[in-house]
Image: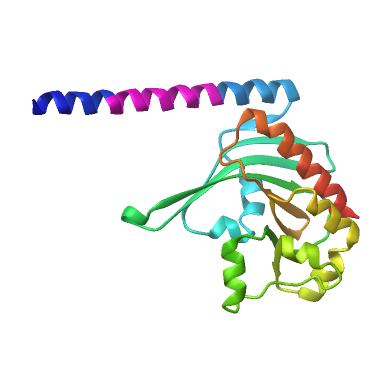
Amino acid sequence: MEWLIVLSLMGILGGGYAYISHLERKRKQGLIALSRELELELNWQLPETDLVRFNQFEIANQGRLPTSGTTLIADDGETRLAVFDFSYTTGYGKHKRSHLFSIAMASSPKLALPTFRIDPQTWKSKIAELVGFSDIEIEEDPDFSKQFTVHGDDPVAIRMFLDSARRTAISQFPNQSLAGRSDSLLVIGKYGRLKPENIRQMMTEALLLVKAMRG
């Protein structure tokens, strides 16, 4: 009887692995097809020059085992847009957790951003505020401050940068997190790992935000 249970478990595990492998092959094929259709550069990890730029951001140094994955790149000579998988791990044992992201990193010499991070308000951020972790309030726009948390080293520069037009643009994408630094902007997506059907949307959102950030 015990060997029947073992065989059943092995069959379930084998079937699960085969299904995951099938999904991964299908995803890879979809990404290859999309890169050809849109004439995008496709890499299976973030290229070194982009990785150096990305490593300047806080999210790149969170948790353990930070890993960049599949990357699609569009570069028109003025704006370079890299859309890629990113993950890191926190906790150990039963508390171990993998954090998966889709990130669009736009770089342009026409960007001049203060260092900031903007995230949608969550119950966790509201609790953090209650225990003393304050964010940067935009006094003239209380609705924006209710919708997002804003952090950065220079509150004055960030408030000046987040004018009405930029706040309006950011508010169009209430589920995305943003991070800015010098000539680069991160749009940190809610999608988990990249899905071919989401890439067009993420690239469009990132380019619209870059246009707004230029002013």
Count the numbered circles shown.
Answer: 0
Q: Can you say whether 202 is above or below 180 in the image?
A: above
Q: Which residue occupies 76% across, 49% down?
A: 107
Q: State left or right for residue 6 relative to residue 103.
A: left
Q: Which colour scheme is used?
A: rainbow
Kindly identify the residue that appears in the image at 73 percent across and 35 percent down. Answer: 201
Where the C terminus falls, by quadrant? bottom right
Residue 138 picture quarter: bottom right
Examine the structure image and report whether residue 1 is included in the region drawn in magenta: no
- In the rendered structure, the answer to whether residue 160 lies left or right of residue 18 reads right
Find residue 29 and report its horizontal and vertical position in percent: 57, 21
Is 75 situated left or right of 31 in this image? Answer: right
Q: Is residue 46 visible?
A: no
The chief SS type of the magenta part is helix
Task: Left or right? Give the position of 20 relative to 185.
Answer: left
Residue farthest to the bottom, as pictured:
132
**Which sits in the foreground, 172 or 113?**
172
- State whether residue 170 appears in this view: yes
Residue 150 position, x and y percent, is 71, 66
- Percent of width and height locating residue 108: 81, 49
The boundaries of the magenta stretch are: 12-27
Q: Image point 57% across, 55% down: which residue?
A: 60
Within the magenta stretch, is there residue 23?
A: yes
Farthest left residue in view: 1
Q: In this view, does 141 lie above or below 2?
A: below
The residue depicted at 67 percent of the width and 33 percent of the height is 198
Q: Which quarter of the picture shows residue 128?
A: bottom right
Where on the picture, by quarter, is residue 140?
bottom right
Closest to the observer: 84 or 145?
Answer: 145
Image location (x, y in percent) of residue 129:
62, 73
Quadrant in which the N terminus is drawn: top left
